[in-house]
Image: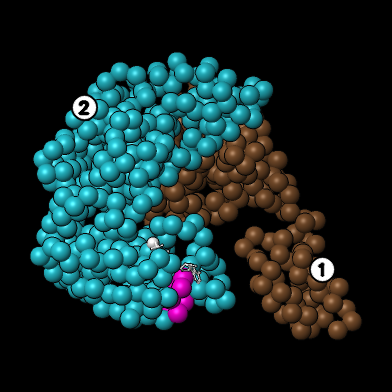
Chain colours: A cyan, B brown
Amino acid sequence: MRLERIYLQNFTNYASQDCMFGENINVFQGENAQGKSNFLDAIYYLSRACSYRHNKDKELMRWEQPYFRIKAIVSQKNEKHTITLTYHEGKKTVLLDETPLQSLDQLAGTFLTVIFSPEDLALVKGSPDHRRKFLDDELIQTDRQYARELYRYKKIIQQRNHVLKTMRQRYEEDDLLQVYDDQLAVCGLFILQRRLAILDKLNPLAAKAHDQLTDGKEKLSLRYLCNLPGDVCGLTEKDYLKALQERRQEDVNRGYSTLGPHRDDLELTIDGHSAKTYGSQGQQRTVALSLKMAEADYIQFHEGEYPVLLLDDVLSELDGTRRESLLRLVNQNIQTFITCTDAEDMRSQTLHFEEFIIKDGKII
Amino acid sequence: MQNVKAIDNLIRQLSKLPGIGPKTAQRLAYRILFMSEESVRQMADALIEVKETIVECEICHNLTDIQPCALCRDVFRSDDILCVLEEPKDVLSIERSGKFKGRYHVLHGSISPMENIGPKDLRIDQLVRRIETGHFKEVILATNPSVEGEATSMYIARLLKGKVDHISRLAHGLPIGGELEYADELTLGYALEGRKDF
Ligand SMILES: Nc1ncnc2c1ncn2[C@@H]1O[C@H](COP(=O)(O)OP(=O)(O)OP(=O)(O)O)[C@@H](O)[C@H]1O
Ligand SMILES: [Mg+2]
Ligand SMILES: [Zn+2]
């Protein structure tokens, strides 16, 4: 995947900005608060029609402006496409090659990005939902059926929790809970199996990336922590139902569903020790980065092409050796956008990159 | 303008309708304002008339202007087979497929505890009684293929177990998460023919 050209109108602090990019490493350099991260956000927005740091699209409109637009030429396996995303009066519209799309998810797969930003440290340090979301994101991007089943799964859990919470007194409670259990067993097992399958692929990729980033000094390993009893690999619908049955009373007491993939976690270890508990700041950051590199590799494996890599403020957090390894890693046919306040660190390497100086919402 | 109050009121009334936001309501209100008095009267009468004449059929709970409804009265339809649906509009969809000649039962919704809709809020008790007192050999549960629609069918299937020989579910030629209303006639026809035992 390549982003060849982008045109921003009223996007965050950009009034109007047209820009063309290099095939490999592109560096956005500038002082704090000039719009470097905003630019990455615009590129990210092209891939998923949502921001990586704002929940509300309206926050992306330049202050006092009634709309924003991002227009881009991207190439996918050497085929060029234009994507135009417009947000106006609370509505998002997408044109793909000048043709309007009926729904936003038709955009999926046209332009793929993987982002790494300081907040991604939560992948290692944060609560389990960050790690579940990491797995789910990859699956959603590459597997439509998963996206659908995950949506269903969340819905079933919501409905079931409502029964547990509010309908406790009603006599049909048991029959209704049984119905949701039956639905969960099918849907939950599907989610579980797909997650285990993708983890099998991600594990060696993450280990390889981590090995390269740390110059062979650390061994990273991922393990799925399933809260259903027994061996996850051989789990059947029947086992699943039985486990729900056994947990029924506790669920009723607590008023929510305590069992299933919505409560699972991913264990990350460096040389056998939990990265969350024992990792240093730099180690944790490197682990998060390795996971993102594994995600990029997985997309390459799945789609036959690397996604575009967006690295926000990564360099300043890594030591010289890790920084060098990272740049070596991305410098193999992955179009990468890196933000930094000072490109000096990069110039010291014998590395070719395009440089863009960003100042107050403009590329100068 | 003097009478803005009346216009505001009309806008408020119109925006009670699903899919009508304040802007659309305003546009409609002005449209109505500039229609001839006769057309407006006809429209108002039509509104009152549906409310006064349309009732729920006491047998199948479809909407009707005669009691019981035409479909329940039709002697050429089979009393062996019953098709259970979420909404009155779904009856029209199945009728359009032309593949079904049995009776209908309309639930008026699907079970959704999140929205405070439990089994008691639907015409499920009436369905059970109808099965117990009738002579149906097969019940087709043709709820939407959404989480709620499926849960409703599964719940009903549990209640009807042992009370009727066959309980079947529409085969999923239907788009997942979709609604019967949007399924085309051909897909619905296939779905009816390829229905599966529960
Ligand atoms: N909707 C908006 N309209 C106008 N300006 C905005 C909008 N949203 C954000 N900004 C401004 O954009 C500026 C740049 O933000 P951005 O996060 O891109 O900076 P940055 O260059 O990445 O800085 P840092 O090096 O500190 O990370 C902020 O100062 C913010 O006030
Ligand atoms: Mg920034
Ligand atoms: Zn009737």
Q: Which residues are magenta?
A: A9-15
Q: In this figure, which residue is indicated by the disc labeled 2?
A: A272
Residue A235 falls left or right of residue A157: left
Residue A10 located within the stretch drawn in magenta: yes
Quadrant (top left/top right/bottom left/bottom right) for the N terminus of chain A: bottom left
- Toward which corner of the image does residue A16 lie, by quadrant? bottom left
Specify whether residue A162 is in view.
yes
Spatial distance from mark 2 to mark 1, Cα to Cα? 69 Å
- Toward which corner of the image does residue B170 lie, by quadrant? top left
Is label 1 within 8 A of ligand 3 (CB to nearest ligand atom)?
no
Residue A333 lies, in percent from the top left, at 13, 63
Return the residue nearer the eye: A55 or A359. Answer: A359
Check disc 2 and give the amino acid type: Gly
Q: In this figure, which residue is indicated by the disc labeled 1?
A: B9
Label 2 secondary element: loop
Residue B77 lies, in percent from the top left, at 54, 44
Residue A169 falls left or right of residue A226: right
